């Protein structure tokens, strides 16, 4: 991060005769030359945006757009969901400062709408079954058969459970989706709070780790 510190325009003065656009073009070029799956670069951008660094050549919006483009490019290139997609999605998040008084601020986290749409389009068009399989979780604290819940990670992508339900309602009906919706209805009765008993027939449950965005 220190190498991108352009405080008092010191980088553009030293290397680009004061031309800020040439400096920005150079930094953008470096990020554009990254190789798939872009994890290091995306995590670096997330680090910059999460810590609200100032004077780091590009704006928060410009860094965020690069991270979103990584997500979109990767989703266009692959056919099946994997951990890299979740990582790239999370790394488009930014921190937003809001003034709450003369000398105080609050910080909120935000994942852009464009990232959410890219993710939703990917699972809808390419790999809904594996996505639904991945978000079914078993208890990690004890060995219990046939007890499951749906990962709270859906709230980062769909904002709330109703939006997730509406999304599923417009997908092509398949035997595994019908089974998932039966499971969803039972889980909904717990207000999305408790593991429930369910005997899956169409969906093969993996030993899923909890999906955490933090």
Image (cartoon, rainbow, N blue to C red):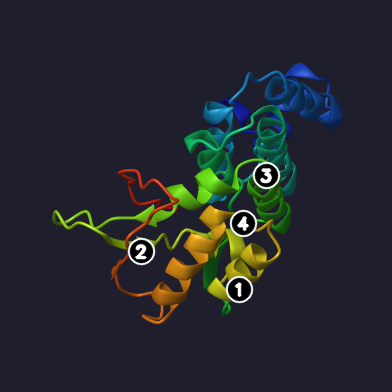
Q: Disc 4 on helix, strand or loop? A: loop
- Residue 82 vertical placement versus 211 (above, below): above
Give how far across and how far down residue 200 sits, in percent.
37, 56
Label 3, label 4: how many angstroms apart (C-alpha)? 17 Å
Label 4 or label 2, whichever lies nearer to me, is 2
Residue 141 occupies which quadrant of the picture?
A: bottom left
Q: Which residue lies furthest to the left in this view?
A: 142
The residue singled out by tag 3 in the image is 122
Label 1 or label 3, whichever lies nearer to me, is 3
Label 1, label 3: how many angstroms apart (C-alpha)? 36 Å
Image mark for residue 149: 2
Q: Disc 2 on helix, strand or loop? A: strand
Label 1 or label 2, whichever lies nearer to me, is 2
Give how far across and how far down residue 33 sits, in percent.
71, 18
- Residue 146 vertical placement versus 92 (above, below): below
Give how far across and how far down residue 69 sits, in percent.
72, 37
Check contact, mark 3 vs mark 2: CB within 8 A: no
The residue singled out by tag 4 in the image is 111
Label 4, label 2: how many angstroms apart (C-alpha)? 24 Å
Residue 35 occupies which quadrant of the picture?
A: top right
Front residue (pair 102, 114) = 114
* Residue 206 placement, left or right of 165: left
Check contact, mark 4 vs mark 1: CB within 8 A: no
Residue 55 seen in the figure: yes
Front residue (pair 128, 77) = 128
The residue singled out by tag 1 in the image is 99
How many labels sit on residues? 4
Q: Disc 1 on helix, strand or loop? A: strand
Label 1, label 2: how many angstroms apart (C-alpha)? 38 Å
């Amino acid at each position: 991060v220190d190498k991108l510190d352009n405080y008092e325009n010191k980088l553009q003065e030293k290397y680009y005769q004061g031309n800020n656009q040439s400096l920005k073009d150079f930094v953008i070029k470096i990020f554009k030359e990254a190789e798939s799956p872009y994890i290091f670069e995306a995590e670096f951008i997330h680090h910059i945006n999460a810590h609200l660094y100032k004077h780091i050549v590009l704006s928060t919006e410009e860094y965020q757009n690069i991270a979103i483009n990584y997500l979109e490019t990767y989703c266009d290139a692959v056919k099946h969901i994997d951990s890299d997609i979740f990582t790239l999605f999370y790394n488009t998040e930014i921190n937003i400062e809001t003034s709450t008084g003369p000398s105080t601020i609050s910080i909120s986290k935000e994942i852009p709408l464009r990232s959410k749409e890219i993710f939703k389009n990917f699972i809808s068009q390419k790999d809904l079954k594996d996505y639904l399989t991945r978000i079914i979780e078993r208890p990690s604290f004890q060995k219990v058969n046939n007890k499951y819940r749906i990962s709270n990670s859906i709230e980062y992508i769909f904002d709330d459970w109703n939006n997730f339900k509406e999304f599923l309602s417009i997908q092509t009906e398949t035997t595994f989706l019908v089974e998932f919706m039966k499971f969803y209805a039972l889980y909904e009765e717990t207000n999305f709070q408790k593991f429930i008993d369910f005997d899956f027939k169409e969906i093969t449950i993996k030993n899923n780790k909890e999906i955490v965005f933090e």
